[in-house]
Amino acid sequence: MVADSLSAVRNRMAAAAERAGRDPKAVTLVAVSKGMDAATVMRAYEAGQRDFGENRAAELAAKAPQLPADIRWHFIGTLQTRQAKIARPFTTLLHSLDRSRLIATWGSNATVPAALLQVNVSGETQKHGVAPDDAGQLLTEAVAQGIQCVGLMTMAPLAADPEASRRWFIALRDLRDRLAPGHPEVKELSMGMTDDFEVAIEEGATLIRVGRAIFGPPGAPASSD
């Protein structure tokens, strides 16, 4: 049941925050609802969830109008520039600002949702994201374009052991702290998913993106609450 799964995730979040001496309320759970129908999202909403993550512009645009207006939609996937105008009207926070062309497109509107700069802290060639050394310049571009860039996002390499992700979460936190003198508005850290969100919280995550632990694996039939 979605409600039970949400409760279990929230309990794990609280325990991780307490281990790190943090307030559990300082961490926002983004329920990754990509591939889930509106009825399934509604079950999570009825269990108190308000932040949801999508990674396809067309799916977000089709799903959002079917659901309550107070949902905060997070766009968490790679966003093609030609899809930006589709996603933007429904997006509260873009997690994947990662290049100059997207900055120009995302900022070219009277209403510009806030964004996080996606950083490839691990240097994996198959991952999107700006290199850490280039993050400051891209932030400057975003500000000049009128985008409120409120934090950083990263995806750790896949690993069997959640502890393997810790070094990358520390790296993102340290990068934020290095950028702070010139960009004090950059405070949020979006890091950690189903397999490693507890480690991410211990290292300072303010947003975690969790899908499988709430809704089950992709393609799994939605259970009825």
Image: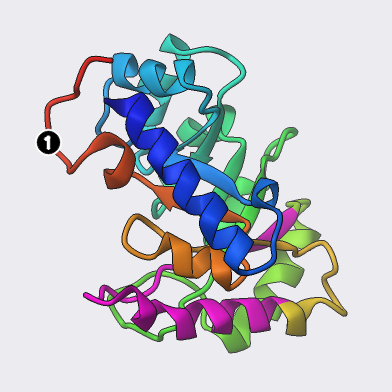
Front residue of this view, candidates 81 and 119: 119
Q: Which residue is tagged 1?
A: 219
Task: Name the image quarter holding residue 122.
Answer: bottom left
Front residue of this view, candidates 190 and 136: 190
Q: Is residue 76 left or right of residue 72?
A: left
Coloration of the structure image: rainbow
Q: What is the x, y in percent for residue 177?
A: 75, 80
Q: What is the x, y in percent for residue 7?
A: 43, 35
Q: Determine the residue positioned at 33% across, 17% down.
A: 38
The stretch drawn in magenta includes residue 203: no
Residue 122 versus residue 155 in the image, above or below: below
The magenta stretch is 149-176
Residue 81 versus residue 19 in the image, above or below: above
Give the structural element (helix, strand or loop) at label 1: loop
Q: Is residue 158 left or right of residue 165?
A: left
For the question of whether residue 200 can be seen, the reply is yes
Q: Is residue 183 left or right of residue 163?
A: right
Q: What is the x, y in percent for residue 25?
A: 68, 46
Task: Name the image quarter holding residue 175.
Answer: bottom right
